[in-house]
Image: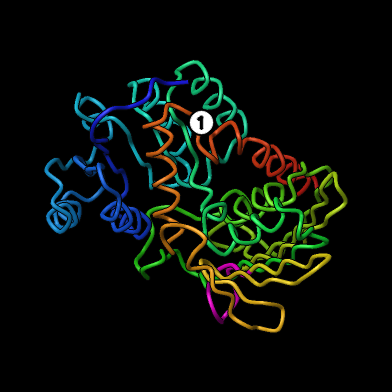
Amino acid sequence: MSTPHQGPIRVALAGAGAFGIKHLDGIKNIDGVEVVSLISRDLEKTREVAAQYGIGHVTTDLADALALPEVDAVILCTPTQMHAAQTLACLKAGKHVQVEIPLCDVLVEGEEVVRVAKESGLVAMCGHTRRFNPSHQYVHNKITAGEFNIQQMDVQTYFFRRSNMNALGQPRSWTDHLLWHHAAHTVDLFAYQCGSPIMKANALQGPIHPTLGIAMDMSIQLRAANGAICTLSLSFNNNGPLGTFFRYIGDSATYIARYDDLFSGKEEKIDVSQVAVSMNGIELQDREFFAAIREGRQPNASVEGVLACYQVLHALEQQLDAG
């Protein structure tokens, strides 16, 4: 692995949209880390955000930031279609990199990232936030302690996105994807929580949207090697609460996770405030990235560690295309 990093970590952040802002807010709480460059498509908007967060360097071109010798690491919050190529560019420039989910939307590109990351000895991580949310960490700790075993996960990923808008209600410059983006969270989390690889996966999709060209509704079934199953429903048509809601049905309890919050099957709130140093999943994810750089080790959710998820998504895509 890479040599442990001494001194402050200087970061370039690409993508000053809704998710980039979440990272900037999280990093503010982490000692010894400074964002020194902000990269985004619209120079004026990028300058505004940079001014708010005291970031000195602003550009519309990732290559400009990669050329800065002071940049140690990059966080990519850019459109899905750019993730693999930009991750490769960061690694080839000698920078540690954390790429937001998904790692790729074409499997061979993700496999190339894993190969280059291994050769580079750099920290390369993918933003599988659900591994870090206190709610899911609480369940994970119960599982590793042998106190809870998943029988079924029942997951709903619901948005109301019949036009191309982002989380802030602003027009998107790219098309989001139920399978490669939103299903990736659950496919990875299910295998991670079970501690068992996914052996069987089925998918069905609803009608293709006439202008967006994507399925707006999808249903996925998974089975892990240990026998646990997962049922995942995804929709861009759901007019109701937005987000992903996880029900863990186990041998000793039922848990419902909503982002960083956790409830029992009877909707009693469970205190997860002591699970980690923060209640913010994105901040905890970034803390792991920087800790891995400091300690010269592989992070939880390394690109290699999440590749199996994208192999499952690839198989599901082939199944849907054949159907």
Quadrant of residue 251 within the rendered picture: bottom right
Q: Residue at x 73, y 60 (%)?
A: 205
- Residue 297 placement (x, y as % from top left): 48, 28
In the rendered image, which residue does mark 1 sit on?
A: 298
- Residue 135 placement (x, y as % from top left): 57, 64
Of the pair 165 and 284, the residue shown nearer to us = 284
Q: What is the secondary structure assignment of the residue under circle 1?
A: loop
Of the pair 170 and 8, the residue shown nearer to us = 8
Q: Which residues are magenta?
A: 236-245
- Residue 228 placement (x, y as % from top left): 83, 55
Of the pair 80 and 70, the residue shown nearer to us = 70
Of the pair 239 and 131, the residue shown nearer to us = 131
- Residue 124 placement (x, y as % from top left): 46, 32
Does residue 237 belong to the magenta stretch? yes
Left or right? Give the position of 247 relative to 152. left
Quadrant of residue 153 within the rendered picture: bottom right
Circle 1: is it few (<14), some (14-19), or many (20+) Cα within 10 Å?
A: many
Q: Residue at x 59, y 72 (%)?
A: 262
Q: Which residue type does callout 1 highlight? A: Gln
Q: Is residue 306 above or below residue 192?
A: above
Specify the principal SS of the magenta part: loop
